[in-house]
Image: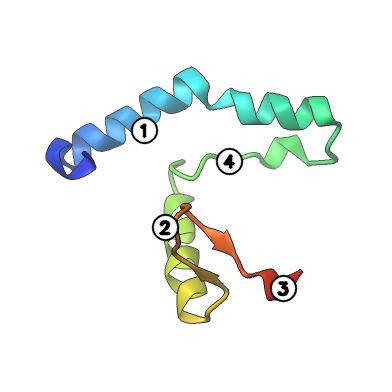
Amino acid sequence: TRHDLGRGAFTDKIWAWKDESGGNITRQLRRMGTSIDWSRERFTMDDGFYKAVQGVFVRLPKEALIYRGKRLVNWDPTLH
């Protein structure tokens, strides 16, 4: 588990996964023809970006906009 690995080794595994598989989602979105400003694409662990991601995932549950369930994140259906 991530706890058995320790933070450093777990982070290394995340970056290895990104290098191997991270482009799959981007390629799928591009094939679907999504209208995205690709020059602004970021990975959640990029320098200077991960603190903002952490902040959002602390704030949103406090505001009851997301909750933890069986999946990683379940978006609040009342917002749709």
Badge 1 crowding class, 10 Å Cα cut-off, few under 14, some 14 to 19, many 20 or more, is some
- Identity, as a three-letter code, of the amino acid under mark 2: Lys
- Identity, as a three-letter code, of the amino acid under mark 4: Arg
Give the SS element for disc 3: helix
Specify which label sits upstream in the sequence, 1 or 3: 1
Front of the two marks 2 and 1: 1
Front of the two marks 3 and 2: 3
Q: Which residue is mark 2?
A: 51
Residue 70's place in the image compared with 23, above or below, is below
Q: Are marks 4 and 2 in contact (CB under 8 Å)?
A: no
Q: Which residue is mark 4?
A: 42
| Apparent side of residue 42 relative to residue 35 in the rendered image (left or right) | left
User: Mark 4 to mark 3: distance in Å?
Assistant: 25 Å
Q: Are marks 4 and 1 in contact (CB under 8 Å)?
A: no
* Tag of residue 79: 3
Which of the pair 48/62 is nearer the observer? 62
Rendered image quadrant of residue 38? top right
Badge 4 crowding class, 10 Å Cα cut-off, few under 14, some 14 to 19, many 20 or more, is few
Give the SS element for disc 2: helix
- Identity, as a three-letter code, of the amino acid under mark 3: Leu
Q: Residue at x 52, y 39 (%)?
A: 43
Q: Which residue is mark 1?
A: 14
Which of the pair 42/9 is nearer the observer? 9
**Picture quarter with the C terminus:** bottom right
Specify which label sits upstream in the sequence, 4 or 2: 4
Badge 2 crowding class, 10 Å Cα cut-off, few under 14, some 14 to 19, many 20 or more, is few
